[in-house]
Amino acid sequence: MIKLGIRVWILIIVLFLSLLSISPSFEKGLVIKSVDQNSTSFNEGLRSGMKLKSINDQEVKEISDYTKIMNQVFPTQNKTKLIITTDKGEFMLYTNETPKITLGDIPRTKLKTGLDLSGGSRALVKPEKDLSLSEMNDLIAVTSNRLNVFGISDVTVRPVSDLSGNNFMLVEVAGASPSDLKELVAKQGKFEAKIGNDTVFIGGERDITDVCRANAECSRIEACYPSENGYFCRFSFVVYLSEQAAQRHADITSKLGVNVTESGRYLEKQLDLYLDDNLVDSLYISENLKGQVTTQIQVQGSGVGKTREEAIDNSKDNMRKLQTILITGSLPFKLEIVKLDSISPLLGKEFTRNIMILGLVVFAIISGILFAKYRNIKITLSIILTMFSEAFITLGIAALIRWNLDAPSIAGIIAGMGTGVNDQIVIIDESVSNLNISIRERIKRALFIILGAFFTTVTAMLPLFWAGAGLLRGFALTTIISITAGILITRPAFADILKKIQE
Amino acid sequence: MEEKKGQSMEKTRSLSRLYDKTYKFLLFIPFILTLISLIYLGSFFSNHGDFIYKDTTLSGGTTITLNGNIDSGPLESKLKPEFPDISIRKLTDIRTHEPLALIIESSSPPENLKAGIEKILGYNLTEENSSTEFSGPALSQGFYKQLIIALIIAFLLISIVVFILFRTLVPSIATIFSVFSDIVMALAIVDFLGLRLSTAGIAAFLMLIGYSVDDNILLTTRALKNKENTLNERLFRAFKTGLLMTLTAIAAVLPAFFIVSGLPDSFRQIFLVLAFGLFADIINTWVTNAGIIKWYCEKRGIN
């Protein structure tokens, strides 16, 4: 039985913890990635993260199984029963449309890949003026809220700043990119309801206490008509105003005259709804509302499409958008998208696979060189083991802090492997040289060189945390994690192992 | 075994004498190379108004990547009139030479470029068949400036760390000069090859600073702090160790160009810049810095 030193034990423990953190799983199947809020699936309790087992007693293992079942059941006129079995229990849906959920393969590890490897969209948004910390937090809250209401999941919204002190909001949406991300994020979402030049109410909690949504009683598509280019639908929903806003409405309308038209008696001015300074709709105000303090207002709008279905969908979208903006409120400043990237998931998949191959090739080549140089299987193996440990610990920490590994991050890990090997070479060469001084002293000298190299690399990478809105932070982060793991954990262990080998 | 050792010792001794005679002249080689690189960069600057060719992440504009095997010829000729600054590159598989994707860059906004490409291809660009990256011009120029500042900060910080480590003037300056030459030479090669650098490419220069100091530290420590053996022996041993270090680092970097294909552009740039820098580093550390250190030691009577 070889006695292992404390440093080697530390290495083993850290490796074990990294394994726990990455937690590889060999489970195959599908997991729910997102569930549309306002959908039957959501109301019945389906949530993202649940693993799909079967639907109507038919096993679901791959996306093709799921599509097959859906094609058997839908389209259907009448509501059908759908029994969805997940790892968290059974859910029963009565529906005439396919569940509003998105599915993905069960991830094999807890490692997350960045946008450039998994595909998705990223927008870097710059407010037109400098924001205070609380304004920036508001912006992020409003944006997250808005994306949530739109049922976009797998999204991260966070503030970033750069070396010049600019503040940005970074929005990242994984998976397939919603084509309206741009519109959704950049639009200020300023909602104003005006009569003439007087503002009656604006979006946000101050003026609006509630908005009726997902309730057919007070939020619905009214009717659809054929039009020149297809179809045209009208929607309406009820908005509940605060006392002050209602009072304002009464004050403004009390001064208006009445027009008598064929369809009824209306006030001479209309209630104009503006979204981002564009007129969305003008509503007639019936005579009996003149001067009334009313806290309930019906807001209307419309949607168009080539077919009736398209027109309905379009109206629903418009309605949802308007509702969101009314609830979440408007931002008191304009936004500009300064960077917008959308990466195809297909290309990303190809990249990920090739990077894995690259990692293995680099591993093999370095091992080959080292073996050719030292002609000693024990030494070569221990270097390889150390190199592997460093990469593994870095991945473990990345999983732990939920870091999205993008291409620069992985380049950092591979570059870190290179530095790690360099240091091992220094340790070996120092330890076999000058045999007239003690191995302790020799390894101490090696550690001086290594520490020097460590500090220089860390200092060189530090500025990357801030430069360029931190988009290259991953590169600096993984490099620093990897060499820090090296200096604190693997290299001391390696020095111990080497002492054992030479004794 | 004994005989072999004797032979190699004899060889080492004659090499050592040769080195004693020539090392001051050898110093000229890297100095001249650095000078040529500097002159080249200077003329590059006066011709292009900048030190590098920048891609859209640094200059602003749109990059559209089309997946699959698409003929670039007609696309380029038809896009040129509308987008005069367009550049099209192919991403091919190294072994099969099969085109994997087409990378189209222009300073135009994404909507225009996308529409132009769609018109020629006759189908819509979706998330399935393409990637679109857009950087606003002001932002990109800001990024460029910041990354350059980051590079300068990194360089200054490194210089401070080096001074703290060595606590002697000449070896510290020699190391800093060697790092400087690495950057200048790598930059000159990048420009000479006409590469358009991205943000990741500049980040690689920061990494290069960190990487290239390693063997300088090794060299200086071995030469000045250790007192065993002769100076030449210590230098030579350091050289053997350092060369192995640099070669393994290069070996880690090169497969990205010759063996594995279909890697993200950012990834390839990082590795390419590191490879150039590491090659330059072999000369700058083991000819320049070693020479200066030897000179310094001889003046100081360290041997």
Image: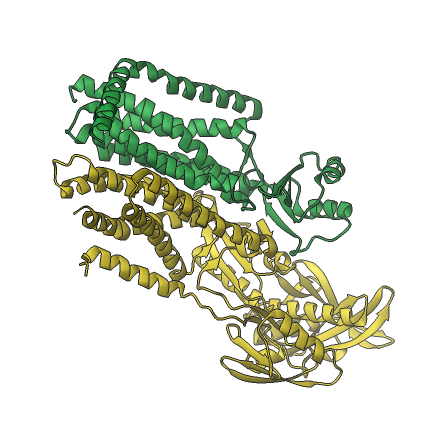
Q: How many marks?
A: 0
Tell me if A259 is positioned left or right of A115 in this view: right
Q: Residue at x 26, y 53 (%)?
A: A489
Q: Is residue A130 visible?
A: no
Q: Residue at x 12, y 37 (%)?
A: A437
Could you tell me which quadrant the N terminus of chain A lies in?
bottom left
Of residues A145 and B237, the one nearer the viewer is B237
Tell me if A289 is positioned left or right of B137 in this view: right
Relative to A319, is A156 above or below?
above
By what rule are the colours in the image chosen?
Answer: by chain
Of residues A252 and B22, the one nearer the viewer is B22
Q: Is residue A246 visible?
A: yes
Q: Colour of chain B?
A: green
Counting from the top left corner in percent of width and height, residue A434 is at 16, 34
Name which quarter of the figure residue A10 lies in.
bottom left
Of residues B267 and A382, the one nearer the viewer is A382
Counting from the top left corner in percent of width and height, residue A15 is at 32, 59
Counting from the top left corner in percent of width and height, residue B91 is at 61, 42
Of residues A181 and A386, the one nearer the viewer is A386
Name which quarter of the figure residue A273 lies in.
bottom right
**Chain that appears yellow:** A
Relative to A435, is A47 above or below?
below
Tell me if B62 is positioned left or right of A432 in this view: right
Relative to A13, is B248 above or below?
above
